[in-house]
Image (tube, helix red, strand yellow):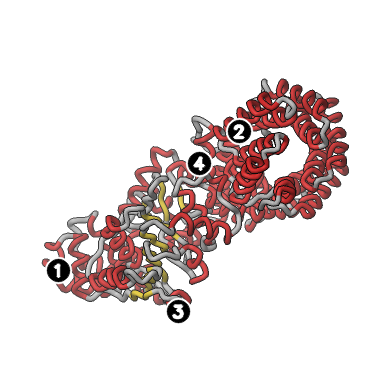
Amino acid sequence: MPKPSQLPAGHLLVDRGEALASLDGIRSGHAGTGVAKVAVVSGPAGVGKTAVALHWAHRERGGFPDGQLYADLRGHDTDDPVRPVEILGRFIRAFGIAPERIPAGLAERSALYQSLVSERRLVIVLDDALSAAQVTPLLPASANSITIVTSRWRLAGLLMRGARGVRLEQLSTDAALQLLERTVGDERVRNEPDAAAELVELCARLPLALCVAAARLATRPNWPLSEMVDALTHERRRLTELSVEDDMTIQAALMLSYHELSPDEAAKVYRLLGLFPGDTFDSWSAAATVALPRTQVRPLLEILTDANLLDDVPGGKYRFHDLTRLHARELAEQNESETTRDQTLRRALDWFLCTTATVNQVVMPYRHVIRDAVVHEPAEPVTFTDPAQALDWLELEFRNLRAAIRTAFERDLFPTAWQLVDALWPLFLYRGHHAERLEVDRLGLAAARACSDSPAEAKMLNRTGLALRALGRLDEAADDFRRALDIWHREGNRRRILGSRRRLGLIEMDRGHVEEAIVLFREALDGYHAAGEPRKVALLLCDLGDALTEKGREAEAVACLAEAEDLLAGQDDPYNRARARVLLGRAQAGEPETAARLVTQGLEEMRRIRSETGQAQALQALGDLALRDRREEDARGLYQEAQRILAQRGARSRQLDDRLSRLGGT
């Protein structure tokens, strides 16, 4: 199992020996007590909470050999804070657990996370927390690890449960001067001691404001400190007149740094990226958003990073500090026309939609993705070398994509919102994310209804129905499938009507109503035969063969499944080829060696393509074969393994529940 190493690079730190000693004490003070070690580093914005947490974590990571976890909880960002269930998913994946094996619910994810960390020695940094409730599910229960939480709030709820607080205040004057010396050079500070002293007071001795101001001085070695003092004094006076209170000091430093940006394109890129609908961006998405070539954008991003207006993060990405993002967005509101702001946001959303559509082409080339909401085609589209790389991108960008969907919905760009949801299907099919899936799909449904697009509404009803079916909520799933069917009838879309009938047949199979399922499958199969759609015919033959096997009509099932295999041989659809092989083996239970060989081949293919659902189906089929041979213990073990896989991804199967119930196993 891999050891996570997620800590971002540390920041310059001065005069925080007392805070670091407090963290040392929290680590050693709980030794041998069995009590979880949790520190809450709190203080005002810009005081250096993250710098302290990361400095200590980097310094002490040798004492935590099993790895380091880090999460930015975005508690004070312009967008919604990150939910604990999402962070749990990220942490679990960091231990090498396949995404499709991660359960959906918060309680299930929390239990899996605790089992992974209970015997490990880890240092965990939870940055920018909003509340104790956001943090609590992420805390290891054992005393082997230490968790450092940073927040503008003291988080009394955590302190009441045994966490220890570390409060940060502004730097002392001497420490602030030391920080200035280390960033601009001690000679400049010695040459202008009065100006240096005034500068650190203008920055309120806050590390963030000092670093932003010093970044401008560092790039201008001949600029006297007194000029910076004059400029900062003027900026603070202007902000005071505008009634900017809480973050006036930091805002003044940001404005001064912004005014000194060169070339002018850097300032414009800063403003426009403040409108970007997501937490992080790279040179591809930034270039598309600001409508500049990547070769031009990359050095501009570095200029903004050097000016401490952007942070660089692993993977070639960048992000704003929450205050800096707000500052950039306010400047865009003041300096860019409404048309420019709207086009900037639209370019970012279109880039997400185009790139996500490309993922579909690579992973599921047979799938037609609607993307007619796109207005701005990216000048430099992203390409992928294989399906795994495409899915990795989709998973890495999932939080940004969700933010993009919400932004599109809030801006009444309803076609963009539902088309983005539709294009996320490969992620849900192959990588799970069931905790987030239903919420996303329902937002897509609301968007489709808001733009009065009946076909889009029906597509989204199918998506919410599939999400509900995966969660075992069969009655709700059937309701959504029927609503979709009603729309397709009104639209006169025969092909879609057949698809809805097939989905209702799957619900009947889940309920154990096999005869009803067979009727629905045959109706859909006849329609697809008439329409000349070989892949759809093959899928229905698989469904029908499965149902016939369930009823003990093996000869009919084998004929259906053999035909399905032949049809799928020419299709770029490895999942359904493996599924047909598993079902064919199950149908040939009367020939045990042949049956076991076919099902095992299908299981190996499902493992190769990392389909957890497919693996569960194959294990259930092997359990059926074992039960037919009266190997009840083997069957119970195989059913339980299949059930465990489904439970880990937030899904369930009533067929498996019934089989285990009959065997007396759970």
Residue 160 shows which numbered tag? 3
Residue count near mark 1 (Cα–Cα under 10 Å), binned few <14, some 14–19, many ≥20? few
* Badge 4 or badge 1: first in the primary sequence: 1
Residue depicted at x 43% and y 50%: 269
* Badge 4 or badge 2: first in the primary sequence: 4
Q: Is residue 567 above or below residue 508?
A: above
Residue 404 pos. (x, y %): 57, 52
Identify which amino acid the numbered label 3 is placed on. Answer: Met
Residue 594 visible within the image = yes
Tag 4–tag 1 contact (CB < 8 Å): no
Residue depicted at x 44% and y 63%: 140
Residue highlighted by disc 1: 192
Residue 573 pos. (x, y %): 64, 29
Q: Nearer the viewer, residue 467 or 448?
A: 467
Identify which amino acid the numbered label 1 is placed on. Answer: Glu
Residue 87 pos. (x, y %): 50, 57
Residue highlighted by disc 4: 393
Front label number (4 vs 2): 2
